């Protein structure tokens, strides 16, 4: 058989591929293929090297691979530093010092950096609409549904040529937060970011969770996709929950998600896989009911990072929407910025203020008609963009207690005035319901509080 080139790469990186770096900030690139030559039919040298695409400077001299007499070869380039983009070149020559050997195949636009899995449902897959500036960029690449590497561009969950019917969207998706997130991560970290698309609009947790009864097609597709990229990833970008806002599913969401996360790490052989989660935004569809279910699920999302190492949660309650349940394209850009800060702080240990305001204490005052909330993670002062709305609800043994007034006391205290005295033990809910009023947020950072449910109100008389 006559080959078009003298060195063929049958197994190895493809154009646009991002290779997951190791803990030392380096990666090895393994390759194998065939060689063919009439000039040197006996004992030729198959050589390979990486070249920086921006400067055309080789990372090293030509490195010899192992060429066999049967016309096959294999080898690897070791200790490639995080960075790129690189060009992989091969050639065939009579010795390891040749510069003008016979032509070999080339792979373009390679990078060594971090891989992040896109998982969850529609707000992760990307259904945001509206014009925004969010273009493709070299060094931000996507392993798409066709299991091919490409320069990342919207829509990330586009289904042309998909080999995963399980996560094929029924409609064309639009804009997702993760391209801009990856751009910001690349800018801050200084090396390429690869995105591995596995999300699907409307998907319930059970489809991702192999520890639950039933089929788990999205889990299976995710594992297959990650294995196809090399089997390692730095983390997961998870935004899901709307499909689990029923009484039964919301009540068990926390336990089921913790089990799913452990199963993901085991299946991917990544015990430290970082998981960034997003707390549910509002839903403005009047046909969607279940205020308590949505609140319980958001509380589960708030609790998960307290019980799962290498995990964080990002609020989304304030994001603008392009329909009754999907964040708009502008909302996605805001979420991307917020998520990038959280990732840098929680996953990469950067000294950045990323944590959302979160309830720390709730105290019933002596008049029993005033509740004071103390919030953690407030860098400046609490404020609200909805002066007419109160995003808190108090509930006691007699039911809901109407909150007649909300005062924000510098710098991190919220004072709630109630319509009547509290009866018995009471709890407070933050951002209660399917479509709660606008939340309070940290003024300078423009980060809203995390929603919470059933936080106990102290009277100061509880047994210690």
Image (spheres, rainbow, N blue to C red):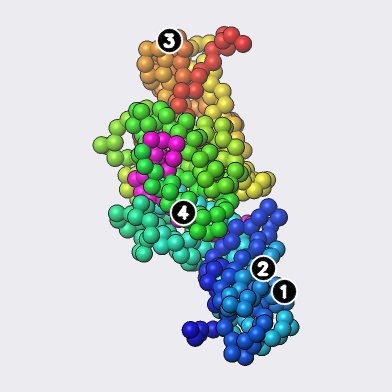
**Disc nearer the start of the sequence (2/3):** 2
CB within 8 Å, label 3 to label 4: no
Residue carrying label 3 = 423
Can you name the residue that lies furthest to the front here? 70
Can you name the residue that lies furthest to the left here? 287
Q: Is residue 460 visible?
A: yes
- Horizontal placement of 7 versus 290: left or right? right
Membership of 146 in magenta stretch: no
Membership of 208 in magenta stretch: yes
Query: Which contiguous range is marked in magenta?
Result: 186-213
Q: Nearer the viewer, mark 2 or mark 3?
A: 2
Can you name the residue that lies furthest to the bottom here? 39
Q: Nearer the viewer, mark 3 or mark 4?
A: 4
Residue carrying label 2 = 77
Distance (Cα) linking label 1 and label 3? 75 Å
- Horizontal placement of 463 versus 249: left or right? right
Distance (Cα) linking label 2 and label 3? 71 Å
- Secondary structure of the residue carrying tag 4 is helix
Residue carrying label 4 = 224
- Secondary structure of the residue carrying tag 3 is loop
Distance (Cα) linking label 2 and label 4? 25 Å
Residue 381 position within the rendered picture, expressed as x and y whole percent measured from the top left: 58, 36
Residue 39 position within the rendered picture, expressed as x and y whole percent measured from the top left: 62, 91
Q: Is residue 321 visible?
A: no
**Disc nearer the start of the sequence (1/3):** 1
Residue carrying label 1 = 60
């Amino acid at each position: 058989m006559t080959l078009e080139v003298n060195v063929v790469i049958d197994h190895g990186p493809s154009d646009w591929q991002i290779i997951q770096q190791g803990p030392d900030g380096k990666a090895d690139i393994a390759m194998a293929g065939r060689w063919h030559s009439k000039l040197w039919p006996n004992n030729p040298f198959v050589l390979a090297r990486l070249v920086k695409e921006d400067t055309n400077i080789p990372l090293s001299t030509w490195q010899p691979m192992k060429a066999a007499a049967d016309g096959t070869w294999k080898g690897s380039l070791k200790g490639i530093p995080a960075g790129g983009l690189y060009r992989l070149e091969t050639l065939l020559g009579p010795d390891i010092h040749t510069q003008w050997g016979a032509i070999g195949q080339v792979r373009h636009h390679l990078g060594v950096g971090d891989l992040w899995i896109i998982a969850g449902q529609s707000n992760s897959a990307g259904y945001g609409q509206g014009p925004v500036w969010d273009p493709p960029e070299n060094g931000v690449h996507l392993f798409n549904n066709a299991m091919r590497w490409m320069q990342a561009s919207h829509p990330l969950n586009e289904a042309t040529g998909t080999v995963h019917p399980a996560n094929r969207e029924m409609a064309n998706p639009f804009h997702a937060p993760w391209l801009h997130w990856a751009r910001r991560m690349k800018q801050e970290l200084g090396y390429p970011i690869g995105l591995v698309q596995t999300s699907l609009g409307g998907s319930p947790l059970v489809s991702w969770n192999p520890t639950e009864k039933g089929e788990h097609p999205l889990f299976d597709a995710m594992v297959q996709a990650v294995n196809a990229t090399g089997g390692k990833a730095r983390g997961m970008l998870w935004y899901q929950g709307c499909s689990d806002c029923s009484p039964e599913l919301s009540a068990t969401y926390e336990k089921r998600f913790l089990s799913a996360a452990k199963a993901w790490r085991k299946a991917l052989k990544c015990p430290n896989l970082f998981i960034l989660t997003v707390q549910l935004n509002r839903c403005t569809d009047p046909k969607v009911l279940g205020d308590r279910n949505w609140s319980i699920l958001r509380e589960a999302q708030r609790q998960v990072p307290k019980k799962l190492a290498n995990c964080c949660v990002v609020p989304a309650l304030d994001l603008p929407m392009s329909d009754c349940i999907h964040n708009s394209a502008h909302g996605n850009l805001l979420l991307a910025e917020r998520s990038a800060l959280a990732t840098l702080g929680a996953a990469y240990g950067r000294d950045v203020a990323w944590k959302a305001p979160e309830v720390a204490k709730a105290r019933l005052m002596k008049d029993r008609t005033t509740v004071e909330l103390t919030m953690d993670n407030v860098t400046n002062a609490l404020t609200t963009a909805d002066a007419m709305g109160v995003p808190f609800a108090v509930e006691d043994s007699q039911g809901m207690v109407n909150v007649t007034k909300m005062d924000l006391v510098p710098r991190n205290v919220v004072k709630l005035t109630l319509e009547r005295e509290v009866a018995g033990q009471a709890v407070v809910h933050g951002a209660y319901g399917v479509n709660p009023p606008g939340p309070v947020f940290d003024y300078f950072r423009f980060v809203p509080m995390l929603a919470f449910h059933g936080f106990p109100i102290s009277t100061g008389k509880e047994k210690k």
